[in-house]
Amino acid sequence: MHAFLRQLSLVCLVALATVAAPAQQPASEPTEPPASRDDVPDDISLPQAIVLGVVEGLAEYLPVSSTGHLILASHSMGLSTRSNASGPLGPTIVKNPAIDAFEVVIQIGAILAVVGLYRRQVGRMALGAIGRDPVGRHLLICIILAFLPAVVFGLAFHDLITAHLFSPYTVAGALIVGGVLMIIIEHLVWRRRPNVKRVTKLDRIRLWQALVIGLAQCLAMWPGTSRSMVTILAGLIVGLNLVTAAEFSFLLALPTLGGATVYALLREYGPLMEACGPLTLAVGVIVSGLAAAIAVKAFVAWLTKRGMLPFGIYRIILGALVLAYFAGWLN
């Protein structure tokens, strides 16, 4: 796990080191026109696909925000630019929709990784769907109940979030706040109350607990927050133990990531194929799946004996570096 944290840190430090800082315009010169999607690349090379696949796979199920890391990684490779127009939350990241779609579709690899690792639970849910496994049916109902709030919230606010929240400052803020919350909640809810009876099996999760976790998942639509983080923390708060909360978060990712992938394919299939082609997309999916499988196995093993404190510290440090860089304090 220490190796994973070092790899994630390296990706983000490379992003910070290689993104060109915008030049300051003299007061007498006219300001540059706002950057548009025509100003950024509309294709993805094979090496870029591999990098994005590794970042997606490693970060998707860890509580560090895959969206935030993908924003930094793609920005460092010149696949996006900052808008010169600054809104209330700072300049937004401008990216070609096809590249956005690529970063969503390679989640297929992360989905398949969880299906493979948790094939027993997935199989029982499939049997439950046809009335042949009551335990699997209960878990399936919990997953569906937890998934529904994200559907409603996502359809209502997707375009608004994309237009206004994809900013270096929003990502940095979410990383820092999330890191602080991880440390506080784990300490107050988990470590200070070790003798509290908690749910230790997925089939013991109650419907109201699943719904609360699903409502918390909506917070992850703020870039940099981390879907994994908010669902695991919500699980702790409603009475799950750390490993069970993580495993429920992994299974909840299946419909959540699957729905986002289908939505991206329907909206951007043509431009996506022009941007990368089937081979590059397949490589991104495969790399994402392999990285996700390794990350999930290592993360569960880590949580069995340790907690999330290192991830919280990592988020705070990374968020501070991102904020300092894009605010010009490191220039």
Image (spheres, helix red, strand yellow):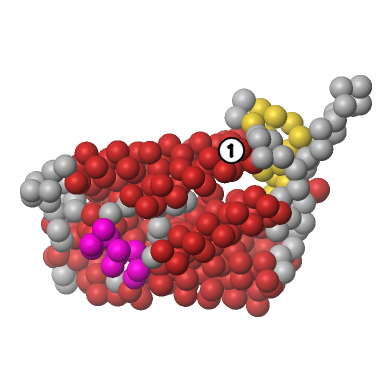
> Residue 168 occupies which quadrant of the picture?
top right
Q: Position of residue 36 (x, y in %)?
A: 77, 42
Q: Which residue is mark 1?
A: 323
Q: Is residue 297 visible?
A: yes
What is the x, y in percent for residue 203?
A: 16, 61
In percent of width and height, residue 160 lies at 57, 36
302 magenta-colored: yes
Q: Is residue 253 above or below residue 288?
A: above
Q: Vertically, is 304 above or below 169?
A: below
Residue displayed at 46% across by 39% down: 176
The answer to whether residue 246 is magenta is no
Q: Nearer the viewer, residue 128 or 225?
A: 225
Q: Quadrant of the C terminus?
A: top right
Q: Residues within 10 Å of mark 1 (few under 14, many from 20)?
A: many
Q: Residue at x 40, y 43 (%)?
A: 179
Quarter occupied by residue 25 = top right
* Residue positioned most to the top: 28
Q: Secondary structure under badge 1?
A: helix
- Residue 258, compared with residue 212, is above or below; it is below
Question: Foreground residue, 322 or 72?
Answer: 322
Residue drawn 35% across the image and 68% down it: 298
Boundaries of the magenta span: 296-306
Residue type pointed to by label 1? Leu
Query: Of 23 and 119, which appears nearest the observer?
Result: 23
x, y percent for residue 320: 53, 40
